[in-house]
Image: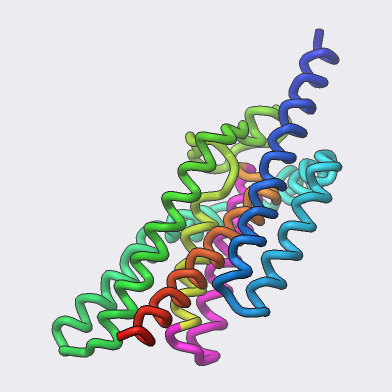
Amino acid sequence: MKGLSSRRTDRSTYLNQIEISIFLCIIQNFSCKFVNRTMRLILFFASICSINLSYSQNLDIDFLRNITINRDRQWENVFIGFTHSAAPVSIALPTSLVFYGFIKKDSVSKMNGIQSSAAMLLSTLLSTSLKYSIDRKRPFVSYPDIERGTEAGSPSFPSGHTTAVFCTATSLSLNYPTWYVIIPSYLWAGSVAYSRMFLGVHYPSDVLGGIVIGVGSAFLCYKLDGWLNDRR
């Protein structure tokens, strides 16, 4: 019975991986109409990586096990802190830009904040819709040897935390393209993404999906904002 249950789990997870791969390919092809060459390359390679994972679920879970099972407990609270920073920072930054724009009568900051908020809303809608349509089980549910290091209740794919932080980091980097904005933004986003695997609540492919949705949403809203400005 244990072997049969294991085969059913592997089959279910394999089917989830195929659904994830199809979604990433669709996003990559759709986004080619709206984003630049760099973004297309990011989406293309993300799609290829996800397709490879769909043919090798063992790679996904083995990679996660290497991160989480032997994790250094001394770093646990640090990564819990990164995980808990995702929502407050992702909400506070665009909101602060909007308020600053209104107070200082700075139309650029105000529009940057609105654009970032729109990207966050889009990425959240995409992420949440996919979570409940794909309904992938969390790794600690499917694999009892994966120990959960923080609370996690919704379905696994994609990582909502990763989606939010990469959307925020990309929006900031596009609107303020300086090294002292880009480097800290992506270091923070990368740390949050890694924390989701370190704490055993997401597969690597969940994190990859979150990166694609977050970056793609930010690029799409940035390009759409530029297109609207050109038509005014």
Q: Quadrant of residue 40?
A: bottom right
Q: Position of residue 42 (x, y in %)?
A: 69, 70
Work out whether residue 77 or residue 196 is closer to the camera in this orientation and state it. Answer: 196
Instruction: State how many labels appear.
Output: 0
Picture residue at 82% right of the left edge, 13% below the top = 4
Q: Is residue 113 above or below residue 151?
A: below
Q: Is residue 201 above or below residue 198?
A: above
Question: Viewed as shown, does residue 218 lie left or right of 48?
Answer: left
Question: Viewed as shown, does residue 49 lie left or right of 102?
Answer: right
Q: Residue furthest front?
A: 231
Picture residue at 56% right of the left edge, 49% below the top = 159
Q: Position of residue 192 (x, y in %)?
A: 55, 60
Q: Quadrant of residue 48?
A: bottom right
Picture residue at 38% right of the left edge, 71% below the top = 116
Q: Is residue 174 magenta?
A: no
Q: Is residue 186 magenta?
A: yes
The type of colouring in the image is: rainbow
Picture residue at 73% right of the left edge, 65% below the top = 44
Magenta span dominant secondary structure: helix
Question: Viewed as shown, does residue 124 lie left or right of 192?
Answer: left
Which image quarter is the C terminus in? bottom left
Q: Is residue 117 above or below residue 183?
A: above
Q: Position of residue 1 (x, y in %)?
A: 81, 7
Q: Residue furthest top?
A: 1
The span picked out in magenta is 175-200
Q: Position of residue 134 (x, y in %)?
A: 59, 35
Question: Viewed as shown, does residue 24 lie left or right of 126?
Answer: right
